[in-house]
Image: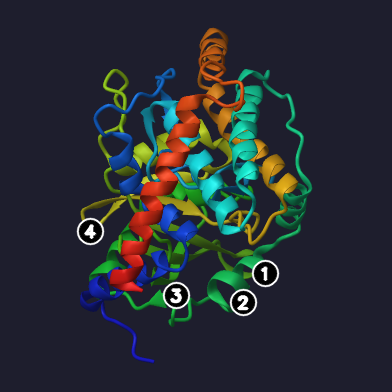
Amino acid sequence: MKLPTPDERGDLLKDRQRRKMARSAQTYVRGATVQFYDWLTQDGRALPEGPPVWICGDCHYGNLGPVANAKGEVAIQIRDLDQTVVGNPAHDLIRLAFSLASAARGFDLPGITTARLVEQAVEGYIAALVAEAGEAQDKPPLIKGLLRESKQRSWRHLARERIKDLEPSIPLGKRFWPLGKDERGALGELVEDARIRDLITGLHSRPSDADIKLVDAAYWVKGCSSLGLMRFAVLVEIGDGKTAQLSLVDVKEATRASAPRSADHPTPRDNGERVVEGARHLAPFLGQRMASGRVLGKSVFVRELLPQDLKLEIDALEPEEAVTVGGFLAGVVGRAHGRQMSREDRQAWAKTLGEGRSKTLDAPSWLWRSVVDLMGSHEAAYLDHCRQFA
C-alpha cells in the first residue's frame, strides 16, 4: 500500500471527507458545522439571548462522552471544543436538539418521539442549569454502561485501538500517514516546549524533571468536519529504564471558529489558546489535560489521550430510551453552561427557556421551529451532497 506524501494529502483528505459525509444524514449533520451557522445567522432569525458564556459551538451528541481527569476520575462531559467561543448558550441547545432529532429519524423512530425528545432536552437542560453544585444527574442505563466500560480501560486498550500494537511505534497505514522531515522536526520542538512538558508530566504523578523523548509520530487521518487540518499522533516516552512510561499525544490544528461570538466578552485571539480556555470552562476534566502551542507557524492544541476517553456512539435506540438519553445529554450541557453563571443569571435564563410553550408542545416554539427548519434544510443539502460526491 503506497502511502501519500505530505504534498499529496490535501486532495485525498478532501475526497475522504466528502465520502464520509455522504454515509448518512446523521454523519452529514455532524460534519456540517458551517452550514448550521449559515442557517443560524440568516436575517430574521429570532432566538433568545442567554447570558454570554463559553459554549461548545458544535454541540452535537457525538461530541459528548466519558472523559477522565488527571486523577483518573471519569465523567460525561463535552469532549470536542474546536468551535468553542464565548457566545449565546441557545446555540448549543439548538445544535444538540437538532442532532438528537436527526438521530431519531435515522433510527426510524416515530415523529412523536422526536417531539418528546426535544421537550425532554429542554427539561434536562433547565434542571441541570439551576441545580446546585454537586447535585447528581440520574443516568440512563446506556450512560451507566458507557461509564462502566470507560473505567475498566487501561493503556493496553488505548494502544490496541489507536496504534494496534503494544510496541513503542505508530504503524503506518489507513489511519496514520508518514510525516515530512520538517513536520517531525517541528513536533520534536513542540515536545520540548515548557507548556507541553508540564502537560505531559502533570498526569500520573510523573516527576516534573523527567526526561521526555519523542519515540514516533505520524499524520493522523481522523475526524470529519476537521478532516484535512493538520493533525498528528505523537508517541512520547517519559523517564528512563524500567520505570519509563509511554504516552500518546494528540496534536491538532486550531482554526477560526464558525460559531458567533460575543462582542462584549472577547475570546483569546490565538485559536489554540481559545480552545484550551473554552475546555477549562466547559469540560474541566479535559481542560486540565490540554495546552496550546505552535507547529510550523500554525496554532495547535495538545492533549494526552487517556484510555478512559470514549466517544458516544449510538447505533440504535428504542423510543423511551432515546428520550431519557437526550434529556441526560442536555443536562450535561446545561451544567457546563450553568457553572459559568451567577445564580441570578441561571434563574433568569431558565425562565426565558420556559417561555413560549404551546398547549400541544412542552418546548419553546423557537426551539421546535429551529429543529424542524434545520431538519428540512440539512436533508436537502445532504441529498445534493450525495448526488455530487457519493
**Nearest-to-viewer mark from 4 and 3:** 3
Where, by quadrant of the figure, is residue 42 drawn?
top left
Q: Residue at label 1?
A: 156
Whether residues under marks 4 and 3 lie with C-beta atoms below 8 angstroms apart, the answer is: no
The kind of residue tagged 1 is Arg
The image position of residue 10, as x and y in percent, is 24, 71
The kind of residue tagged 3 is Arg
Q: Residue at label 2?
A: 166
The image position of residue 188, as x and y in percent, is 34, 63
Vertical arrangement, residue 41 with respect to residue 322, above or below: above
Helix, strand or loop at label 2? It is: loop
Give the residue drawn at x 48%, y 81%. Answer: 171
Q: Residue at label 4?
A: 296
Give the residue drawn at x 52%, y 63%. Answer: 248
Q: Residue at label 3?
A: 175
Image side of residue 160 versus residue 254, left or right? right
Mark 4 or 1, nearer chain start: 1
